[in-house]
Image (tube, rainbow, N blue to C red):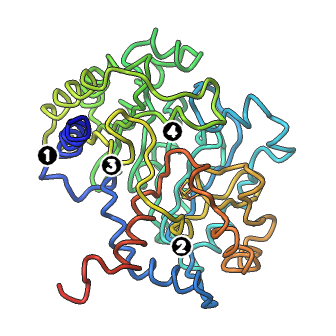
């Protein structure tokens, strides 16, 4: 009886993650199936073949500093709690990042995502590296808190395929409580300017909210704010409070039914020009971590490189010594000395998924197991 109720609860959440009109979206983990051939090559390599294809995407953290102090952020472990982990190199030199993009684009990497490690827009070289990657026909994206904006950034962000604005409150007071700073009005004003300058062909600008005990009553308000600002979308997912390296880690405890009611309101705001994604499929019905896969195989799809030039196995394992792949600094082609090496292969085989919290690649791992290894979709028969 209990299991049936749980299944119904999850089914209701999954059915409303996105509208039928927007089902081919970036949050839909079925996207992984377009990497089918890549999956095959990764598995062949894991089985002993010598060739591992380059990653599809590089996730680059140019900077280890942030002007906000969100307690649930995965970078807090090394930015605030153990800053000595960051070491002396807190920022990548701008000329190096251009050199890195040259290497990555020639190697065959398709996407460059400028992301965490802090707030990337505070790095003065980010507009140039984005524009340079765009000129090399790489798809680009950025995650930002939106508190800093310059004319050069606006131009570079408009050239991205998507821009994610992290915003976890609908008013200045809650924002200050969550981030410990008073930059709500500035962030909102900046996003209005960015959206106003976003002429077609344009970046998909999406507000992204994490569900927290402090903000779950504001979900609908943040969604409406994003729409009023002229953004293209609103995405929301539960915070991962179960990581052992965040302050006060525990299971998220919020009234899920209340959240789901707000999801319904949000979806009613959806139009052709404003999409809503209430993403819950990587969590159980209570928004707790779930592992519905057995092996970690998908990490070679993406290469995270940090501000000290070190690369790691997985975006969720940044700055963890056990998951360090190797260095890309000062010469990016050093990557070829460890990418696809036996040490790389062994590192993947050693991953114990029970020690992982929410897995960004959970469904990709599952697809590699079920669709490629077991051929459960019988792909020879379209
Ligand atoms: S979170 Fe763990 S299981 Fe998931 S991709 Fe990263 S290392 Fe692998």
Query: Residue 7's spot in the image, x, y percent?
Result: 23, 43
The residues tagged by marks 2 and 1 sit, at their Cα atoms, a distance apart of 31 Å
Helix, strand or loop under label 4:
strand
How many other residues sit within 10 Å of disc 1, few (<14), some (14-19) or many (≥20)?
Answer: few
- CB under 8 Å between callouts 3 and 1? no
Q: Disc 2 on helix, strand or loop? A: loop
Report the image quarter containing ligand 1: bottom right
Say which mark, if any, is on residue 204: 3
Return the x and y of residue 49 as percentages of the image width and height: 60, 91
* Residue 79 left/right relative to 8: right
Expressed as whole percent of the image width and height from the top left, the position of residue 176 reads 52, 13
- Res 58 → quadrant: bottom right
Q: Earlier in the sequence, mark 2 or mark 1?
A: 2
Distance from mark 2 CB to nearest ligand 1 atom below 8 Å: no
Residue 275 showing in the rendered view = no
> Which residue lies under the disc numbered 4?
144
């Amino acid at each position: 009886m209990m299991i049936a109720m749980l299944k119904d609860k999850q089914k209701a959440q999954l059915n409303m993650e996105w509208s039928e009109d927007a089902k081919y979206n970036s949050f839909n983990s079925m996207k992984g199936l377009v990497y089918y051939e890549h999956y095959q090559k990764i598995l062949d390599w894991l089985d002993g073949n010598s060739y591992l294809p380059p990653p599809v995407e590089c996730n680059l953290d140019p900077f280890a500093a942030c002007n906000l102090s969100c307690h649930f952020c995965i970078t807090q472990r090394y930015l605030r709690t153990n800053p000595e982990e960051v070491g002396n190199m807190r920022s990548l030199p701008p000329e190096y990042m251009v050199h890195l993009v040259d290497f990555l684009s020639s190697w065959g990497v398709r996407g460059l995502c400028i992301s965490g490690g802090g707030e990337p827009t505070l790095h003065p070289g980010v507009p140039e590296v984005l524009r340079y990657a765009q000129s090399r026909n790489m798809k680009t994206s950025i995650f930002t808190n939106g508190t800093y904006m310059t004319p050069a950034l606006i131009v570079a962000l408009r050239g991205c395929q998507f821009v994610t604005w992290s915003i976890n409150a609908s008013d200045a007071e809650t924002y200050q409580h969550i981030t410990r700073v008073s930059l709500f009005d500035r962030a909102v004003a900046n996003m209005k300017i960015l959206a106003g300058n976003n002429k077609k062909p344009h970046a998909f600008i999406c507000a992204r909210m994490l569900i927290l005990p402090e903000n779950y009553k504001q979900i609908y308000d943040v969604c409406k704010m994003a729409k009023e600002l002229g953004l293209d979308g609103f995405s929301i997912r539960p915070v991962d409070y179960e990581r052992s390296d965040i302050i006060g880690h525990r299971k998220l405890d919020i009234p899920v039914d209340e959240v789901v009611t707000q999801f319904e309101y949000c979806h009613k705001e959806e139009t052709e020009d404003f999409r809503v994604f209430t993403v819950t499929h990587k969590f159980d019905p209570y928004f707790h971590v779930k592992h519905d896969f057995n092996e970690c195989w998908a990490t070679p799809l993406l290469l995270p490189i940090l501000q000290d030039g070190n690369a790691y196995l997985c975006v969720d394992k940044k700055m963890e010594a056990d998951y360090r792949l190797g260095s890309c600094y000062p010469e990016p082609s050093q990557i070829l000395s460890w990418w696809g090496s036996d040490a790389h292969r062994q590192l993947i085989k050693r991953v114990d998924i029970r020690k992982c919290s929410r897995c960004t690649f959970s469904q990709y791992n599952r697809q590699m197991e079920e669709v490629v290894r077991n051929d459960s979709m019988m792909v020879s028969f379209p």
